[in-house]
Amino acid sequence: MDKIVIVDDDPDIRRIAELRLRIAGFHVLTAEDGEAGLQLIRAEKPRVVLLDLMMPKMHGFAVCQAIRSDATLQGVFIIVTSAKTYSADIKKVKELGADLYINKPYDLEALVGAIQKALASSGRPAIAVKFWGTRGSIPTPGRATLRYGGNTSCVEVRCGETVILLDCGTGAREAGLALAGEFKGKTLHAHIFVSHTHWDHIQGFPFFVPAYIPGNHMTLYSVRGTDKSLAKIFTGQMDSSYFPVDLTDMMAHLDFVELEGPIELGGAKVTHFYLNHPGLALGFRIESEGKSVVYVTDHEPYCRLSGDNEHNRKLDREVDDFARGADLYIREAQYTEEEYPTKKSWGHSTWKDAVDSAHAAQAKRLVLFHHDPMHDDDFLDQVVASCRSYMREKGMTFECEAGAAYQHISV
Ligand SMILES: [Zn+2]
Ligand SMILES: [Zn+2]
C-alpha cells in the first residue's frame, strides 16, 4: 500500500482528503503544521506528500526545500496545494522541487487521478532486486572474481516497503550492513526465504547484523528438512563447535515458518516449488504489481539426471511452468556442457539448461546464478557469450547475463 502524507493546517481539508485517499487504497498519514509534517515525512518516507503552503511553524516552501535536500527522501512525489494562484508562487514551488501544483479548492476525484498517474510514471519499480551474493558452493574471494563477486547466494528483493531476502549465503553479511544503516533507529522486518540449508545458502546468517538489533523482526521461511526442523538447523549452525555466538544471542525477534502454501506480504505474493537437488531445495516466485521474479537455484534437470523419458520431461516442464512469463528469471547455471558429465548427480544445471528453461518459460530476462567457484570473471564472460550465440542460433530473444554482486535490477 503506498503511503501519502497530507500536511495541511485546515482540519476539514485533511479529513476529506484522508477519507477519499483511503478509499483509493492509500495508507494516509496527516500533520497539521509544516514542522510536524516534515518530521512525519522523515520518519515514514511516504511516496507522496500533499503539501499546503501557508501553515504555522514552517511554510510549505521550507518543507519542500527540506525534503529535496534530504538524501533519504529521494523520489518522494510532492504535490503542493494552495489557494494562492500567483504565477510567482507556482514558479517558486517548482524551483524548490515540487512535482505538481494544484489550486485549492481541489476536486477530490481529479486529485486521486493525478496521484495515480504520477505514481504510475514516477519510475519506482514494482520489484527492485539487488544481488549481494551470486557464487555457488563456497565463497570465492580474489582478484579474479571482483566483477561477478565471490560471496555465496543472497538476493535482496523489495516490493514497495516489503524487504525480502532470497537465501542468506555469505552475501547476507553486506546485505545486513546496508539494511542496518538504512533502518537505523527504525524497525526492520526482513522476510528471509531459504531455498535449502546447504552452507552456501545459510552461512551468512550468523553475520547478519539486523538479527542482533532488538526490536527488529526476522522471519525465515523454508520447508521442514528431511530429519530436522528449520529452527534446529539454524540453531545447529551456531552451535559452539562451529561459532562463538549462539542463536539466542540474536536480539531481534526470530520466527521460523515452515512453508505450506503461498505467503502474502503487503502487496507481494511468494510461492514455492520443489527442485531437484540432494536433500530438499525450493524455488521461489515473487509477484507484485503485475511483475514477477523467479529464483531457481540448486537444481538439476530431471532428464539430465535420470534419463530422457516422458515422466522426467513432465517434471522438467513443471519447473519451466513455475517460471512462466517471469519478468526476471534468476536461474542457476553452475556448469558448462563439458563439465557436467563429471558433476552429474551433484544437483546442478548447465548454462544451456538455464537458457532452454528461460526460453520454454517465455521469461523476459535471464540472470545466470550460483557461479561455480572454478569460474572466474573472464570465464563467466565466455559463458555469457556462449549463451548469447546459442540464443542467436535458436532465435531466442530474451535478455541474458550473469548475475554480478551489487547489481541492481528494476522489474
Ligand atoms: Zn548452492
Ligand atoms: Zn545445494
Image (cartoon, rainbow, N blue to C red):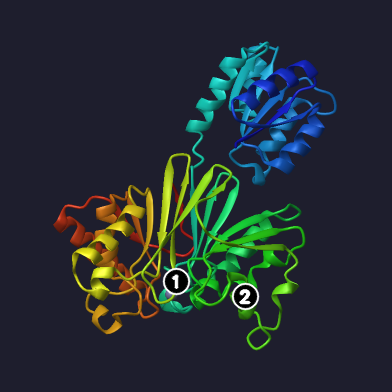
Q: Residues within 10 Å of mark 1 (few under 14, many from 20)?
A: some
Q: Is residue 241 left or right of residue 320?
A: right
Q: Residue at x 65, y 76 (%)?
A: 235
Q: Is residue 127 above or below residue 373?
A: above
The x, y position of residue 109, in whole percent, is: 58, 15
Circle 1 sits on which residue? 280
The quarter of the rendered structure image containing the N terminus is: top right
Secondary element at tag 2: helix
Q: Is residue 51 left or right of residue 143?
A: right
Is 207 or 9 nearer to us in this picture? Answer: 207
The x, y position of residue 294, in whole percent, is: 41, 55
Q: Residue at x 70, y 12 (%)?
A: 84
Residue 136 in sight from this viewpoint: no
Q: Residue at x 69, y 58 (%)?
A: 217
Is 24 or 316 nearer to us in this picture? Answer: 316
Circle 2 sits on which residue? 232
